[in-house]
Amino acid sequence: MTRLYPILLLIGSNLFMTYAWYGHLKDLRNKPLILAILLSWGVAFLEYCLQVPANRIGIQVYSLGQLKVIQEIITMVVFAAFATLYMGQRLTLDYLWAGICLAFAAFFIFRGLPAHA
């Protein structure tokens, strides 16, 4: 569970982060920019409430590089789901290629590295 907990927190964090970065493009597109900024800051606060503990817990079982690659993979998966399901965008083969690159990144960052340096 110790290895899974930071990953679950990072998934939640990325859901908030992705909405904070891109949700206003759909939900607040006709509202004043300052309102979009303030709403995004509020959502980002929730993201940090999950991200900071995720990294504090995660550093006990993963290296810093491993945490970063885990976060990037989660970000890409969450973004792909958000783009298609919430924003109505079409996924292209470029998402597949990016995913393959991230899989190679995961392979190299976890290969031969101790869990915690």
Image (cartoon, rainbow, N blue to C red):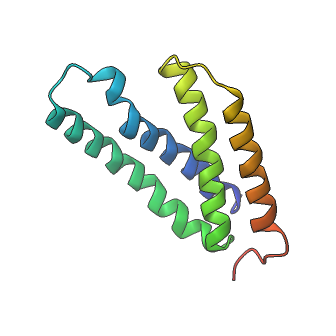
Residue 75 left/right relative to 26: right
Residue 15 left/right relative to 45: right
Looking at the image, residue 54 lies above or below residue 92: below
* Residue 22 in picture, x, y percent from top left: 39, 33
* Residue depicted at x 48% and y 62%: 53
Front residue of 21 and 115: 21
Q: Where is residue 37, by image quadrant? A: top left
Front residue of 53 and 19: 19
Identify the residue at the far bottom of this view. Answer: 117
Quadrant for the C terminus, please.
bottom right
* Residue depicted at x 45% and y 39%: 18
Front residue of 22 and 117: 22
* Residue 10 in picture, x, y percent from top left: 56, 51
Residue 110 left/right relative to 66: right
Looking at the image, residue 58 lies above or below residue 20: below
* Residue depicted at x 70% and y 78%: 116
* Residue 47 in picture, x, y percent from top left: 41, 48
